[in-house]
Image (spheres, rainbow, N blue to C red):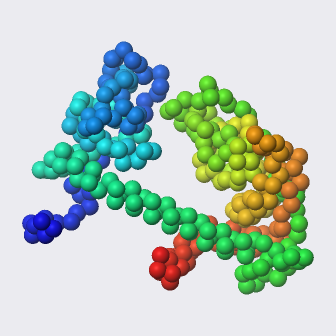
Amino acid sequence: MNKINKDWKEVKLGDIVDITMGQSPKSEFYNKRNEGMPFLQGSATFGFMHPYFETYSSDIKKIAINGSVLMSVRAPVGDLNIANADVCIGRGLCSINGKSNIINRYIFYLLSYYKPKLLKYLENTIKLIEEKERFKRGIAKKLLTCKEGENIPEARFKGFEDEWETKTLNSISNIKKGEQKNKLDLIADGKYPVLNGGMNFSGYCNSYNREANTITISEGGNAGYVNFIKENFWSSGHCYTLHDLKIDKYFLYQCLKNSEKRLMKLQLGTALKNIRQSEIVEFELNIPKSIKEQEKIGGYLNLKILNNIFRFYLIKNNL
């Protein structure tokens, strides 16, 4: 029973199926009146094998044809069903259809069988990402932390010898607080993410007030959390953003990330903790006088070379 038939072969999923990622229409086209095509945003209405439909859309973006395998690509990742009608699928789903003589129902059972292994693979991947982050933070700490009582970092690139200087955050940047957007202002299919403090986006809207590649500090939620947003976004009321930088952007991000625990100690309040802007502007950082040293450190901590060092670290430690 455990022997593999000699006519079988191992292939990549993408070689035997076509995968269509969902795309959500604007919410104004959703309805409960059976107008248009059945719409599935995610796996909330999945049944034992087939979904049931509560929502319809009169605007169709991506279609899963009747008989397609439906798979959830957002939490809970990996849930499976088979479409029992032509369905408009949103961003939380993908449709899978076998190529050539590959039967969809076979794909459904095959993926169901491999689902635990897939989830285990994702779990291991997350662990590796976390290990990589710890590894990166260890290197960053040595490059960005000055020795006690000195203005010289623990580790340094060759060619740099000047002492670092202590600067307040408002002396090297213009700190702006965001403009509040409430839940009623958010739309599911908006073009731009909304950051309202915390670690994750709180939703989407169709306008932005901050440009891509901006450093943010959470004012509420996980107050003191530092992020680097790589796309245009809306900075909401519980978010600080840094502008008009007088030092290297990537160095400043890494320096703030390395100082995140100190930032979080500025939190006030009990249930709803926050950090006052008056505390943020006076927050002190040790900065290299040389812009070239700033660029060297910031570039190093953001470049692929660190990924290569991490791979060597994994091999050396049998991870």
Q: Residue at x 18, y 49 (%)?
A: 106
Q: Is residue 78 left or right of residue 210?
A: left
Residue 65 in the image: state x and y as whole percent. Answer: 24, 35
- Given residues 85 and 267, the one toward you in this image is 267
How many numbered discs sit on the rendered protein?
Answer: 0
* Quarter of the rendering occupied by the N terminus: bottom left
Query: Can the viewer see residue 176?
Result: no
Query: Can the viewer see residue 52?
Result: yes
- Given residues 176 and 42, the one toward you in this image is 42
158 to 52, vertically: above or below: below
Q: Residue at x 53, y 79 (%)?
A: 313
Q: Is residue 258 left or right of residue 276?
A: left
Quarter location, residue 97: top left
Quarter location, residue 254: bottom right
Residue 124 in the image: state x and y as whole percent. Answer: 45, 64
- Given residues 241 and 319, the one toward you in this image is 319
Residue 310 in the image: state x and y as whole percent. Answer: 54, 75
Q: Residue at x 79, y 42 (%)?
A: 270
Q: Is residue 88 left or right of residue 66?
A: right
Residue 237 in the image: state x and y as whole percent. Answer: 74, 36
153 to 111, vertically: above or below: below
Q: Residue at x 28, y 37 (%)?
A: 48
Q: Residue furthest top?
A: 33
